[in-house]
Image (tube, helix red, strand yellow):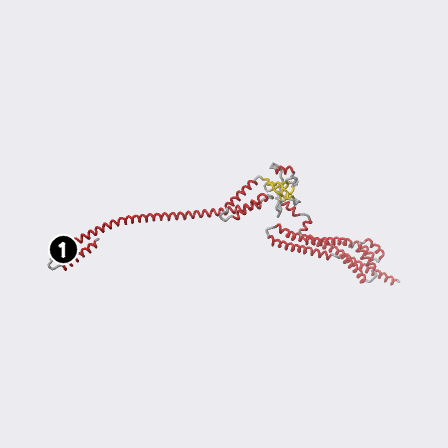
Amino acid sequence: MIAPMKVALLAGFVSLSLLAAAAPSTETLEDALKRATLDYAERLKKAADELNRTRARVMQEKTPLLQEMRAAEDRIISAESGSSRLTTSHEEAATEKRKLQKEIDALRKSTTYISTLAHEGLSALRDGLAPGETQLVGEKIQALERAMENASSGSTAPAAVDIAEFLLAHVQQSTGGYTASGSATIADGNAVTKGTFAFVGPETYFRSEQGGHAGTVRPRQGAIYPVSYSVEGWTPAEAQALFARQATMIPADSSHGKALRLRQTRGSVLEHVEKGGVVAYLILAIGAVSLLMILQKIRDLSRLAVDSRAAVQPFLSLVTGGMRNEAESSLGTLQASTRELFEEGLRHANEPKAILEERLQAVLLGQRLHFERRLPLLAVIATAAPLMGLLGTVVGMVKTFALITVFGTGNAGKLSSGISEVLVATEIGLAVAIPTLVAHGFLAHRIHKNLAMLERHALEFVTAVEVSKTRSNRVNVKKALIS
């Protein structure tokens, strides 16, 4: 406000100077000063009034502005307080969100774990169902598995709870055993019979509706209905008491059905051979031929009876002594093969040594050809039978791989036929080859031994004839000298 006053004073002095300059020369300076003073005072008053009015207006305008400024400051303070509260709330919300996220992750892991346990428990129950229980709970298990598979990753809890309740109910039902209606196949037959199952721990029993059959139950590979086997020594009264839920004696298989399955796998000899396929029958055919030849060779070997050296020595002594007639008479005590050799030798005893040896060698060759016949065929059979078993192995493996191509490796029942053909063909081939090989070795050894003995007898006979001729010549020489 001081600056406007200075401007007003300066303007007054300027005006006063101008008036003084413009006034007539007759007006004195004093009059001019008075008039200027009055004029200045009037203007100063106007200026003061204007200043007061301006101040009043300023004061009037300043009050609302101050109020608005205070209100704005209050709003700013309130906004800053709200912002602080929002920041704090945001941080608290972020902390709560992280906490909730951790809880959600933990719940998700727990839910996944529970779902996994439920699925594994259901699978274990399905795999461990007693024979006949599939008819009772099979559809329920499949429905629960479908519900678990169709549920999304975040909504498996209801399906897991249903599975847990089902497993708990099944365990409670199985505790102490229970009975239920169903159907089974009686052993040694293919007819499906309705009746009642009794589930007692690991064992399952079945009783037909008519009451004519009661026995233990075992599953059958690839079949819908299990098989019921009669139990020896289990009376109908005891069976009736069991199915009436009364105290009684029940049979239990400590092998859990393995003994029954083992008995089923054995079967008859014909069933065992049928597992080997066509190759097994061919091996048995050559085995029958081998058996016939072995029997024939045993008969031939009995005919190839050769006397020992001690039994032949009296005959050779007679030949050495030149007593041909006595030697011919003693042939009746010798075996057929030895007698045939010596008869041929006596017929040609007077011929030269070379001719006599050829005659005896001809007899030995005839004996060898007769008694060694079919021995090579036995050797061929002993060699061919394992090879045929190997052929059956290859055929069975080809069949097995074909089944694997169609059914995969998970179905052992489908693969058992090919594997059985592999093993049975090899087994039968070895069963034919080993006895044939042993028989061939035994027969060949005995025949060669007897033929060697005959050759020795032939050499000794030739020697005896030569000694007899030498003695006869000496006697003739002495007689000639004496005469």
Place of residue 90 in the rendered image (x, y in percent of width and height, measured from the top left)? 39, 48
View extreme (top): residue: 247
Give the left or right position of residue 338, taking residue 55 as reference.
right
The amino acid sitting under disc 1 is Arg
**Image position, residue 75 (x, y; %):** 32, 48
Question: In terms of image quadrants, where is residue 27?
Answer: bottom left
Does the image show residue 465? yes
Query: Tag 1's secondary structure?
Result: helix
Q: Is residue 153 left or right of residue 466?
A: left
Q: Is residue 193 above or below residue 284?
A: above
Position of 357 with respect to 157 (left or right) is right
**Residue 7 picture location, percent across and down:** 20, 56
Q: On the image, numbered disc 1 is attached to which residue?
A: 35
Q: Nearer the viewer, residue 215 or 329?
A: 215
Query: Foreground residue, 312 or 221?
Result: 221
Q: Residue at x 12, y 59 (%)?
A: 24
Q: Nearer the viewer, residue 77 or 128?
A: 77
Label 1: how many Cα within 10 Å (few below 14, some 14–19, many 20+): some
- Total number of numbered labels? 1
Q: Locate residue 243, reporting x and y percent.
A: 61, 38
| Left or right, residue 160 beside residue 258 | left
- Residue ID at (69%, 56%): 384
Task: Check the image and report above or below for 331 versus 121.
Answer: below
